Image (cartoon, rainbow, N blue to C red):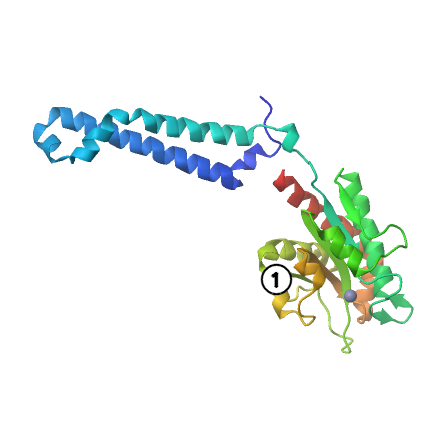
């Protein structure tokens, strides 16, 4: 029997936890029934105290065995590799913020829309190398508008859009990922991946900004299930220089977070 790739981490799967716990309780119930039976046949006084409904149940203890077996089988079937369930329709969406016609934030000759599409391309390179299926809002110098990004986010197991922050305060700095509370952990991992490479600090709650607390309010991409990674401040000369020198390494780290997330889903 071929097991799923990550069977050693199977205890993390909800279906395995529920199945194992349920099997355990069935076994426990069975043991309790057997004990009652044993006691009852040896101590008539004790037996007299057992309610009639319970007495009637005891000969049916084999039903508990069925429950136990059923749960064990469900755990085994979850651990078994099922080609028909594998990778079917699973894809990642990565998009670049803004578009070819909307530059986003600008610092001198640098435009946010151009920097983040370079980053998108670099992440795509590593996802392709890992054999992941992914969708992007264009390749090379193409950066399609937000409406396309939102459409691409639909049905994706993760959808990530890259942006850069900007502030009138040239010292403003740090990495953040804006996401719904359900994606908090993933958002924190993404921010940390970038911050570790860039040597930047994390903004928000360890890199996560709840969408409802974001200055931008409700963002269409996040409502479509996406996460927005802000790769530092384009308005900060140091962060801009760091981005240029290290974005390939940061993209590789981001791709690694995505790859691990995808592996955990299969
Ligand atoms: Zn932006």
Closer to the camera in the image, 54 or 117:
54
Quadrant in which the N terminus is drawn = top right
Quick one: label 1, few (<14), some, or many (20+) residues within 10 Å?
Answer: some
Residue denoted by label 1: 206
| View quadrant of ligand 1 | bottom right
Q: Nearer the viewer, residue 172 or 131?
A: 131
Tell me the quarter of the picture where residue 181 sits. bottom right
Residue 17, position in %: x, y? 47, 39
Q: Residue at x 71, y 59 (%)?
A: 221
| Residue 214 in view in this figure | yes
- Residue 50: give x, y in percent of width and height: 15, 34
- Answer with left or right where residue 249 lies relative to residue 266: right
Place residue 192 in its image quadrant.
Answer: bottom right
In this rendering, is residue 172 above or below 162? below
Q: Position of residue 42 (x, y in %)?
A: 12, 24
Q: Which residue is at a point 39% across and 29% down the rendered structure image?
A: 68
């Amino acid at each position: 029997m071929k097991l799923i790739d990550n069977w050693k981490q199977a205890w993390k799967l909800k279906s395995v936890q529920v199945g194992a716990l349920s099997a355990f309780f069935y076994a426990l119930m069975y043991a309790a029934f057997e004990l009652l039976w044993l006691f009852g046949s040896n101590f008539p006084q004790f037996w007299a105290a057992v309610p009639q409904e319970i007495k009637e149940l005891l000969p049916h203890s084999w039903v508990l065995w069925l429950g136990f077996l059923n749960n064990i089988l469900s755990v085994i079937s979850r651990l078994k590799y099922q080609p028909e369930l594998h990778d079917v329709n699973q894809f990642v969406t990565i998009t670049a913020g803004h578009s070819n016609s909307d530059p986003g934030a600008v610092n001198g000759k640098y435009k946010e829309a151009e920097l983040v599409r370079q980053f998108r391309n670099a992440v795509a390179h590593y996802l392709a190398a890992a054999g992941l299926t992914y969708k992007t809002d264009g390749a090379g110098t193409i950066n399609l508008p937000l409406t396309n990004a939102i459409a691409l986010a639909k049905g994706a197991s993760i959808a990530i859009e890259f942006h850069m922050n900007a502030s009138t305060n040239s010292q403003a700095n740090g990495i953040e990922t804006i996401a719904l509370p359900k994606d908090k952990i993933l958002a924190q991992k993404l921010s940390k991946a970038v911050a570790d490479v860039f040597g930047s600090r994390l903004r928000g709650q360890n890199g996560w900004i709840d969408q409802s607390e974001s200055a931008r309010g409700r963002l269409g991409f996040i409502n479509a299930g996406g996460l927005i990674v802000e790769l530092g401040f384009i308005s900060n000369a140091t962060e801009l220089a760091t981005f240029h020198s290290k974005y390939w390494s940061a993209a590789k780290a981001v791709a690694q977070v995505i790859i691990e997330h995808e592996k955990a889903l299969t």
